[in-house]
Image (cartoon, rainbow, N blue to C red):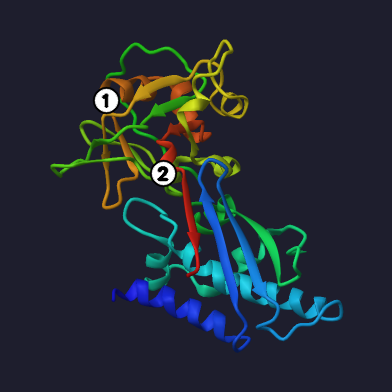
Amino acid sequence: MKPRILFGCLLLVLAGSVFGETKVAISGSIEWEQMEIKAMVKVDLASAGIRLPTGRVQAEEILLHEYPYLVRPYLLSILVDSAHTLEDLLNQGEFSIRSTDTISASAHKLASAFTLDFAFISAQYILSLQRLSRELIRHSRPTDSMRLLIPVPAVPYTGILIIADEELPVHGRHSTALIRPCLFPKIWDTDMNLIYEQSMVDLQYVQRIVRYVSSNQIFRPNPSGLGEDLNRLVGSNPLRIIAQGVFGIYPTDPIIDREDALQILSIEENRRLLQEGRVAIVLNQQVLQTSFSTP
């Protein structure tokens, strides 16, 4: 068994052993369009020896205690960039379990509820992935995007919209893949120049380093064709780019045509779009949501 899989399983075993034979389960999904982890924790009241109505407080305590342990393996599985998961950063000493649990504790908890037969109590939690992104930001001031010695004629745009919802050639491999979402994707051109990364974003805009959307957000019956939230980010006249490929150990980084990159880099107005994080990537619906549950 691989170390990371063993580590995740061990966490689940430890979580289940806190209250002896109490049966506690978690299910939910990672929602990249909303940048959230949605989770439901459920406790078997009989296995916990809880009798109602006096045992409600005890049941709530179990939910509160178990949630951070149960959600941890799925939080650690989040792709940070094209080469690392959050668990990789943990193993490298760049992140801590304490930070993971602090982020888990920041989740918004909805009211708990009993099943109709009063056999289980459950609670829903919504955890912001943007909260996780902020925890991982290391730069204090934005780095400059590439400057061209010989700019090309370009017009200013209101945002950058990269369409990458189909399988694309993987750079350096004889294969194709759907681009997968991560916290900090990079954008490369076809000459493998780095066009965009999280360190280019001004700190006041870090909450929107990247926005992932499905294709139904770019075919709306209005003048811009964009969904309302997307329109607020990239404006009514974004530079629309068809991705040419994907790069990374994990296929997270879109590759755009060099000519499209030149349109971004040639004038200050378009370079500023990178600094303000006015970038959205259209991905296939099947990678925008990942479901999970304990056995």
State the residue in front, 187 or 5.
5
State the residue in front, 86 or 153.
86
Say the numbered circle drawn on residue 257. Answer: 1
Return the residue at label 2: 287
- Image coords of residue 220 (percent x, y): 55, 18
Q: Answer left or right for 62 relative to 215.
A: right
User: Residue drawn at (41%, 67%), measured in percent from left and top?
Assistant: 87
- Image coords of residue 56 (percent x, y): 81, 76
State the residue in front, 123 or 85.
123
Above or below: residue 90 compared with residue 139: below
Indicate the quadrant where residue 246 lies. Answer: top left
User: Residue drawn at (69%, 72%), measured in percent from left and top?
Assistant: 63
Query: Mark 2 or mark 1, which is nearer to you?
Result: 2
Q: Secondary structure at mark 2?
A: helix
Say the numbered circle drawn on residue 103. Answer: none
Above or below: residue 112 compared with residue 126: below
Q: CA distance from mark 2 to mark 1?
A: 23 Å
User: Residue drawn at (55%, 81%), measured in percent from left and top?
Assistant: 16
Task: Kindly identify the amino acid type of the residue bearing the numbered disc 1.
Answer: Asp
Above or below: residue 121 compared with residue 189: below
Q: Residue furthest right?
A: 54
Locate the N terminus and report the quarter of the image it occupies.
bottom left
Which of the two discs, 2 and 1, labels the residue nearer the N terminus? 1
Q: Residue furthest bottom?
A: 20
Indicate the quadrant where residue 257 lies. Answer: top left
Q: Answer left or right for 223 relative to 241.
A: right
Q: Secondary structure at mark 1?
A: loop
Graded by Cα atoms within 10 Å as few (under 14), some (14 to 19) or many (20 or more), the crowding at tag 2 reads some
Task: Kindly identify the amino acid type of the residue bearing the numbered disc 2.
Answer: Val
